[in-house]
Amino acid sequence: MHKKLFIKVDNQKLKGTIFYPKKIKNKNPAILFIHGWTSNETGYVPRAKALCSLGFICLTFNLRGHNGEQKDLDKFSRRDHLEDSLAAYNFLSSLREIDKNQIGVVGASYGAYLASILSSKKKLKWLALRAPALFKNKEFDMPTQEVVSKREEDFFQEMIPKKNNFALKGIKNFKGKLLLIESENDEIIPNKIIKYYLNSKKNASHSIIRKADHALLKDKWRREFIEILVKWFKERS
C-alpha cells in the first residue's frame, strides 16, 4: 500500500510517496530515501517496496527542482536541499506509527552526501550510502548546479576535503550502522571518495557492485543494489 503526499518546506511543497508494509504494528521502523542529483523519487519506488517487505515504512520524495522537468534546478543550493531532507525526515518521524528510535536513511550520490550531513542533525539508526558524492564546505549556499558546472569534468576526481568537511564529520560522529555501496566502474565518484567515507567510520559495511556504472543503467545492477539493501537491513533490524 502506498499514498501520494506533499511535504511543506519554505512555503513550497515537495512531492512524496509513503509506502506501508502489509502488516503495520503500533510502532514500526522507517526508511527515508534521498535521491541523487538530477534524479527524482521514481527510481526509489522498487527499493522502497523491497524494504517494505521487511516491515519498514518507507518515504520517497523529490528534492526541490527535481520534479522530472528540472525547470528550477539552478535555483537551489545544498543548504536548500538539506532543508528539504530535514523536512522529509521531520514528516516521517512525526507519524504516530513510526518508532522514532528506528529510522534510517538510504541515499545515492548527491542524496548520500545530504544523508551524511542529516545524520549529524537527526537521530538515525541506519545509514546506507550508494556512491556518495563529496563537496567542500565552501559555496554551500551557492546553487549546486553552478558549483558543479563551473568545474571541469573531473570535479570529484580532484576532491581533497578538509578535516571539518560537513559530510565526513557527520559520518565520523554517526553512532548507528553504516553501509557504503560502491560501483566498480563509477565514472563520476572515484574510489578515493569511498575511502574518505570508509576512513571516517570504523566498522562500516562495504559492498561493491561489480562492473556497475554510477547510474546503475543495467537492470542487473539495480537488482543487485536492492539485494544488498535487503540483506543488510534484514541482518541489522
Image: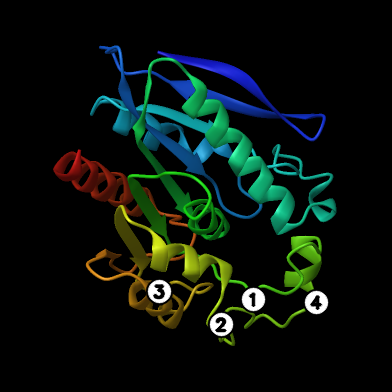
Of callouts 4 and 1, which one flags the residue occurring earlier in the amino acid sequence? 1
Of callouts 2 and 4, which one flags the residue occurring earlier in the amino acid sequence? 4
The structure residue drawn at horizontal position 50% and vertical position 74%, both measured from the top left corner, is: 187
Residue 57, disc? none
The structure residue drawn at horizontal position 40% and vertical position 74%, both measured from the top left corner, is: 194
Of callouts 3 and 2, which one flags the residue occurring earlier in the amino acid sequence? 2
Indicate left or right for 177 with 213 as reference: left
- Residue under label 1: 136
Dot 1 crowding, Cα within 10 Å, few <14, some 14–19, many 20+: some
Which label sits in the foreground, 3 or 4? 3
Disc 3, SS:
helix
Alpha carbon distance from label 1 to label 2: 6 Å
Indicate left or right for 181 with 157 as reference: left
Q: Nearer the viewer, residue 134 or 222?
A: 134
Q: In which quarter of the image is residue 237?
A: top left
Residue 161, disc? 2
Alpha carbon distance from label 4 to label 1: 14 Å
